[in-house]
Image (cartoon, rainbow, N blue to C red):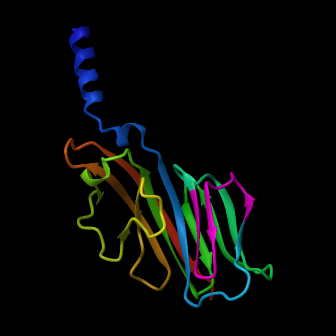
Amino acid sequence: MSDLTGRVLAERRASIPRTLQDGRVVTGIRIEFSVPISGSAPHWEVAHGDTPLIVIADGRAAEIGWSEEAPDGRYVLVAADGRPMVSISADAPKGIQVSSAEAIASWPWVGVTCASGEGDRLSWQVLGAGAMPAAWAENHPGMNDQIRRLDLKSSSEKDDTMVLTIALVDAVTGWALASKIEHQHKARR
């Protein structure tokens, strides 16, 4: 019986697409300014926590990202004049909380590194919640073609809370990588 079980398990493992076996999950937050910032671009500071994998900031937008889930910590986007613009707190029980000025929008994104040639057979799905909102955008411009990315942009301009499970599903085999997303944006008043 153990030989049969071993063969079945080996066959099951062999059917997992390479992307889902070896793919690396990356998650992050995108910040967009409603009015472009002139002059020097803002920069990210790590108040406490692990160093992010991705840090981008220019006059129109900023991003911060991590391999897997955001580690517990606090990350601050600071304007050139030293003024804090955005504060991101991440901890396991509460998820990610973003505090920002009203003129700034934020949303989470999730991505998976893809093996060459497998990207076309993969699609994003929201588990247990029906269709994906129209505001969500896949493969944000400027991202590496090897990363299958989904921006979970809210259609609301106000405070927003999002708790859901999203999966990248292989259409051929049905295998999937899933991630729970917990994001809360509060605008300062």
Looking at the image, residue 44 lies above or below residue 11: below
Q: Is residue 47 magenta?
A: yes
Whether residue 126 is visible to the viewer of this picture, yes or no, is: no
Whether residue 131 is visible to the viewer of this picture, yes or no, is: yes
Left or right placement of residue 129 versus residue 57 in this view: left
Query: Observer-nearest residue: 128 or 27?
Result: 27
Looking at the image, residue 24 lies above or below residue 108: above
Left or right placement of residue 14 versus residue 80 in this view: left
Query: Observer-nearest residue: 94 or 144?
Result: 144
Query: Quick one: quadrant of the C terminus?
Result: bottom right
Magenta stretch: give its range.
Answer: 45-65
The answer to which quarter of the image holds residue 84 is bottom right
**Secondary structure mostly taken by the magenta-highlighted segment of the chain:** strand
Residue 25: horizontal and vertical position, in percent? 46, 49
Residue in the image at 24% along x and 51% along y: 121
Residue in the image at 50% along x and 81% along y: 159
Residue 114: horizontal and vertical position, in percent? 39, 48
Query: Observer-nearest residue: 66 or 100?
Result: 66
Query: Quick one: quadrant of the N terminus?
Result: top left
The answer to which quarter of the image holds residue 31 is bottom right
Query: Observer-nearest residue: 41 or 105?
Result: 41
Residue 22: horizontal and vertical position, in percent? 42, 38
Residue 126: horizontal and vertical position, in percent? 30, 60
Residue in the image at 28% along x and 28% along y: 14
Residue in the image at 35% along x and 57% along y: 166
Left or right placement of residue 120 versus residue 73 in this view: left
